[in-house]
Amino acid sequence: MADPPSTVSIVGAGTMGAGLAVQFARHGVAVTLIDHRESNLADAEGAIADATAFLRAEGLLAASASPAERIERSLDAADGVADAEFVLETVSEDRERKRAVFETVAGAAPDDAVLASNTSGIPITELGTFVPDPERVVGCHWWNPPYLLPLVEVVRGAETSTDVIDRTAGYVEGVGREPIVVERDVPGFVWNRIQFAVLRECTQLVADGVASVEDVERAVRDGYALRTAAVGPFETADLSGLELFRDVADDLYPHLSTATEAGPAFDDRIARGETGVAAGAGFHDYEESLAEAIRRRDERVRAIGRARERTESREEANDG
Ligand SMILES: NC(=O)c1ccc[n+]([C@@H]2O[C@H](COP(=O)([O-])OP(=O)(O)OC[C@H]3O[C@@H](n4cnc5c(N)ncnc54)[C@H](O)[C@@H]3O)[C@@H](O)[C@H]2O)c1
């Protein structure tokens, strides 16, 4: 396995920053967690404690391990990145904020530090234009919660050097995660393109009266995704035979959604204040708090991960 960075400076102590701090710290990395608001650093402490408790409860962290002890906090981005081997920007998804952060850290971090962004959608090539040396700017897109999900997209901007891609992929492996190298800086990278292609089709099916929200949800969660968690779409096509899948694709593709906007499925609910779990309603109604709903999701994700680990170790034992 590759080595983690010796030091990481995480700029932005929100949902992702706090989770990332835990993931790096639990692999022995000295973390500096930076925010421009004291109250957000204080909130991050609670999120770090919650993530640590979750990992312990799931048997993923020894009772004696204390990631929080390796996490320093800072309100000063320039000072906070001065010793960083790896800078991971995870401030709010706003170009001007990210520009300000990249301008600051490019001048303050060591010359050979990697400057990575966790952006979900701002092109890495554009972030590269905010610094004098764009070859060291790279996308490093984690999924929430970063201390649980195994994959991280490492995204090449137009100017990113191969050395920086390799170092970033190595750092990701060094903290127990698997990199997916995204070789072209396309909108949505890989995972979000797939996620939103599926969501677009789901909303279209409901809008066309083909099936209810509940049944489309079940079709994905308990059907498509359950099997896809075992074999991906290409292996599924291989199993069925490519002639069959080609014929189905040729018949079906012309009927799939090509919507270019999120549309009334979102607009109407948002107008009614049904903006999601935190508001008590979105596509579904909720009685639990956001924290409870997140916990429930994470426990399910972990249960699926555990089942896969058990199956894979049985397969390895049989192969051996
Ligand atoms: N939340 C997710 O599920 C998720 C998943 C993958 C990627 N992302 C991406 O990660 C980034 C952060 O998302 P989040 O959900 O953690 O956001 P968030 O709103 O929870 O946290 C953002 C933090 O950045 C801080 N911040 C803003 N400007 C700053 C500055 N100039 N200097 C220092 N700190 C500053 C804010 O105070 C806040 O604490 C975004 O780019 C987002 O697109 C989010």
Image (cartoon, grey):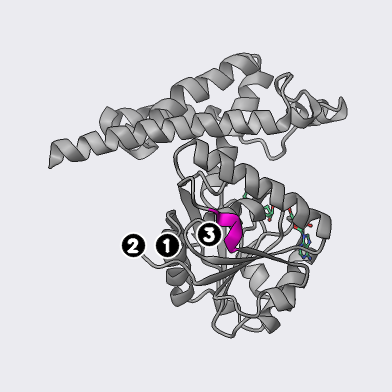
Q: What element carries label 3?
A: helix
Question: What segment carries the magenta color?
Answer: 66-70
Amino acid beneath label 3: Phe
Residue linked to disc 1: 174
Tell me the distance, in whole angstroms, between the alpha carbons under discs 3 and 2: 15 Å
Q: Can residue 231 be seen in this view?
A: no
Question: How many residues crowd around disc 2 within 10 Å: few (fewer than 14), some, or many (20 or more)?
Answer: few
Type of amino acid under label 1: Gly
| CB within 8 Å, label 2 to label 1 | yes
What residue is at 57 percent from the left and 15 percent from the top?
A: 215
Is residue 123 within the magenta segment? no
What is the three-letter code of the residue carrying label 2? Met
Residue 170 position within the rendered picture, expressed as x and y whole percent measured from the top left: 42, 66
Number of the label disc, if any, that sits on residue 1: 2
* Direction from residue 257 to residue 171 in the image, left or right: left
Return the residue nearer the eye: 243 or 167: 167
Q: Where is residue 253 in the image (x, y as percent from the top left)?
A: 49, 32
Label 3 close to label 1 by CB (< 8 Å): no
